[in-house]
Image (cartoon, rainbow, N blue to C red):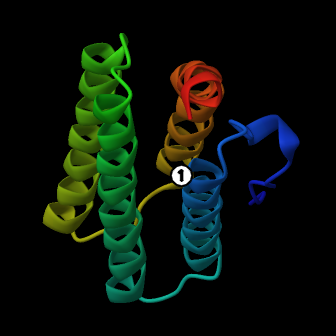
Amino acid sequence: MKDLIWDNSLSVQIDEIDDDHRKLVDLFNRLNHSVADADSIDYINAVLEELISCTVWHFRHEERLMIKHNYAGYIEHRDEHQDLIDSAVALQQKCIEEGRLISAEEIELLERWLTGHILGIDMDLGIFLAEVM
């Protein structure tokens, strides 16, 4: 188990987005620890639900900023958000239906999902917002 460490490489240089990302990193680490510590399935599911809920809220926050500032990449970015949420919810449902904990491989998938999104499409958004805000 390795924690995600927030550092400047994950910063999009927009404080309100970075604050959201820090919270998501914290929740990811909480989920990672709860799986490693073999916490109860109910607790792990609650942490996963919180991570998904906060991610949905964060995505809507970003989308609101994109709409307000007429971001040209809005549709692509919004669609990626929806794909990520759909994947996370499908993973959550699979674990619930199978009555099992999220696996180490699935934790790694969530980590790649979170960091890949921040380091990719969110960096482009950050550059744009820094110019217009």
Return the residue nearer the eye: 21 or 70. Answer: 70
Q: Residue 53, image x and y in percent? A: 30, 65
Q: Residue 32, image x and y in percent? A: 61, 66
Q: Is residue 35 found left or right of 5 in the rendered image?
A: left
Direction right: furthest residue:
8
**Quadrant in the rendering for residue 9:** top right
Return the residue nearer the eye: 25 or 44. Answer: 25
Label 1 packing within 10 angstroms: few (<14), some (14-19), many (20+) = some
Q: Residue at coordinates 79% horizontally, 54% vertically from top-left?
A: 6
Q: Which residue is mark 1?
A: 107
Q: Residue 119, image x and y in percent? A: 65, 27
Looking at the rendered structure, the number of numbered marks drawn on it comes to 1
Is residue 61 depicted above or below 45 in this figure? Answer: above
What residue type is disc 1 on?
Answer: Ile
Which quadrant: the N terminus?
A: bottom right
Q: Residue at coordinates 64% horizontally, 82% vertically from top-left?
A: 37
Which quadrant: the C terminus?
A: top right
Q: Residue at coordinates 59% horizontally, 21% vertically from top-left?
A: 120
Return the residue nearer the eye: 5 or 38. Answer: 5
Is residue 131 depicted above or below 8 in this figure? Answer: above
Q: Residue at coordinates 22% horizontally, 51% vertically from top-left?
A: 89
**Quadrant in the rendering for residue 58:** bottom left
Direction front: furthest residue:
133
**Quadrant in the rendering for residue 51:** bottom left
Direction top: furthest residue:
72
Q: Residue 74, image x and y in percent? A: 31, 20
Is residue 119 depicted above or below 106 in this figure? Answer: above
Q: Provide the secondary structure element on which disc 1 rests.
A: helix
